[in-house]
Amino acid sequence: MIRAVWFIGTAFAGLGGMFIAWDTQLDPFFGFTLILPVFCIVLIGGVGAFYGAVIGAVIVGVAENVGVDFNWAPVFGWFGLSGGGDISLPAAYKPAVAYLAVVVLLLLRPSGLARRELI
């Protein structure tokens, strides 16, 4: 049964990769752009915790999009650093927002959100 589950899961992962490569451009660094945010999601959620990974994915997705769309001028104004106007991050900085979320969470809770004790 375990072997069948691994086979079916691997087949669906390969099929999904084939469809993504078909929809987008395939290059040698294709998985690199996907694996780093997934690594951040696992660290935030907690290694080995399924529900933690789901919560981590929601947190990373919201943090990336809000962090890029947010107007940071009022926040800089609190510290006297803003010259006024609109200060926002370019879309290329989305991975940096995910890494910042990982750093903040690891400082507050090093084992992740859904802590799972290893035997």
Image (tube, rainbow, N blue to C red):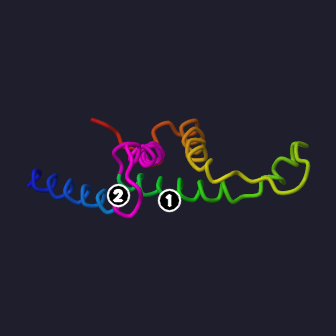
Image location (x, y in percent) of residue 61:
53, 57
Residue 111 colored magenta? no
Q: Is residue 102 above or below residue 51?
A: above
| Res. 114 mark | none
Image location (x, y in percent) of residue 90:
68, 52
Instruction: Check disc 2 and report the residue beneath it.
Output: 21
Residue at left 53%, top 53%? 60
Q: Is residue 5 above or below residue 97?
A: below
66 or 83, which is in the foreground? 83
| Quarter location, residue 67 | bottom right
| Quarter location, residue 85 | bottom right
Q: Is residue 49 above or below residue 118?
A: below
Image location (x, y in percent) of residue 69:
69, 60
Residue at left 91%, top 43%? 80
In the image, taking residue 84 as reference, residue 72 lies left or right, namely left
Residue 47 colored magenta? yes
Residue at left 10%, top 55%? 4
| Res. 58 mark | 1
Image location (x, y in percent) of residue 118:
31, 37
Most prominent secondary structure in the magenta stretch?
Answer: helix
Specify start and end residues of the magenta stretch as a single range: 20-49
